[in-house]
Image (cartoon, helix red, strand yellow):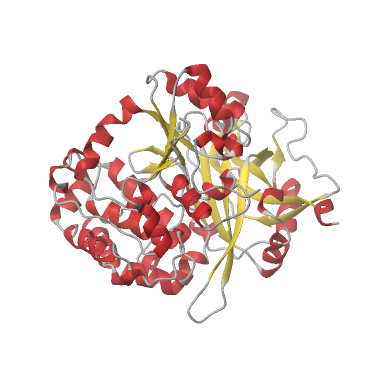
Amino acid sequence: MAVEIHLESLADIPQLGALRGICKKLNIEITAHGSVVRRLYRRLLQGEKEWPDLFQLAPYLSDIDLRHNGTNEQTTTIREAILSEVPYAEFFRWEISSEANSLPFREDEAHLPVIPLNKLTLATRAEIGIQDPFNAIEDLKTGRFRLLDNPFYSRSNLRRSHRDIGFLHAIAFLHVLCDEKSNVSALEHPGWDPCCKLIRQSETDETIISLGESSYLRARVGYRLAALQSVCRSEKQWREIMNESGLKRLIERILFMIPGWNLSPMAIGYSLAWHTNPSWIWSNPHACGCRIGGDLFRIMTNRQEARQEPQSAESAWSSLEKTHKPLKSFFEQPFPPLAETQQVLAASPRFQFRVGKAPSSLGDEHVHIQFPLDETAATNLARYREQELGVVVVLSTDIRELEASEGAPVRSHGLSLALPGACALHQFQLLQDPAIPFVQIRVNFGRVLEVFPELIKKAELGSIASLDFQTFIVADLHTHE
């Protein structure tokens, strides 16, 4: 079915049709903003003949940002309605806020730099369509993107309270350049000079003080850098945006002035290689989780696992019952066999995770996982469409049993769960070596990572020595018969 460029309502998107009934029932209006609307606008301008689905509009490390004109108390009700009525809603991370709650941030926008492509909005109110206050349609048509400097940024309340910093907007602009896959060199975009200016202006002691004072701001920088890395597809592009913009130099200064800061929520041992050696980045696994508090994130760095070669998926799966003792306290079949028609296509390394409650998870805790693939796994995954792939997660805990004597070895216990997960296969093109195939997975753990350690404690099996998980990508063989 052909689509028109001008939508009348957010609810016109087939997968979001349920929003019309939700808004009517709760007497509210919902407005989408940010990257989801940008990707939708771009696809419509390209003349695509089918409606894009949410998996295309909100890929890896992307949220669906919504605000509503109801009360703050209605936000939870709206979230629950979306999760129960929107198809496949549990596969996505929904950032929902009321207009009243977001008012301080929106009022401060008058002092912030502007990326026109990120200011597009689309509401459920009919006959409004996509709102484009900064004429971003011209950016999409020409493939040349803008970043508008703001001379009043020094007056920003967010900046003064250590909740915003200039080079965050530069990273957001670089993210747009990579995500939109423009054929224009980064240096030729109208927003390039303002981007470099923001980075240069951030090379100050004030930046170091702001980052040192605010764990929230450090987390924002880390997530922005992780998101930037996730959409870059070539070493040439990575070196250009890091080196030519001055971002590499700024990161080096920050790392020197704040030693020990991991700089990213990704569970991998970062060093200066993070921005100087692209081959190292894309040849190692990553897992990005929520912030537990301060500078602690759910996913822990596991240097030993991170350095392992990609493991055969089938051998990793078949070894589970040999290396783990089933947690029969919770499930009769902790490692249920796959159906005869199912095949394990790829397996991630094991990632350790921390005990604790995520303050912002709101019942749905998403973990983003990226890891390189060997030739066999990449070939197998390429045979399937993304919607044909499923995710099974194996939770493991090393327990020192209560009856064991001191110094006795711990035993691995585990169970497997099928969880909502979206998978996407990509390649990173190196300058000289062959391209690196890798997969990106977004898994909704719900409250599993929070509750699992508590269940272990209540079962009184012993003291927990470690906690980790491993993801497996599975598919139905009959799909291609």
Above or below, 74 against 261 in this view is above
**Observer able to see residue 344:** yes
Name which residue lies at 50% across and 51% down. Answer: 287
Name which residue lies at 62% across and 53% down. Answer: 49
Q: Between 57 and 445, which is closer to the camera in this rendering?
A: 57
Q: How many marks?
A: 0
Above or below, 433 against 35 in this view is below
Residue 188 place in picture, x, y as percent: 32, 71
Residue 246 place in picture, x, y as percent: 26, 67
Q: Is residue 219 left or right of residue 312?
A: left
Residue 59 place in picture, x, y as percent: 53, 50
The residue furthest bottom is 432
Q: Is residue 151 left or right of residue 238?
A: left
Above or below, 454 against 431 in this view is above
Q: Is residue 388 left or right of residue 68?
A: right
Name which residue lies at 71% across and 57% down. Answer: 313
Above or below, 402 against 215 in this view is above
Residue 248 place in picture, x, y as percent: 30, 66
**Observer able to see residue 399:** no
Find residue 461 and report its image quarter.
Answer: top right
Q: Is residue 173 left or right of residue 309?
A: left
Q: Between 142 and 404, which is closer to the camera in this rendering?
A: 142
In the rendered image, the quadrant that contains the C terminus is: bottom right
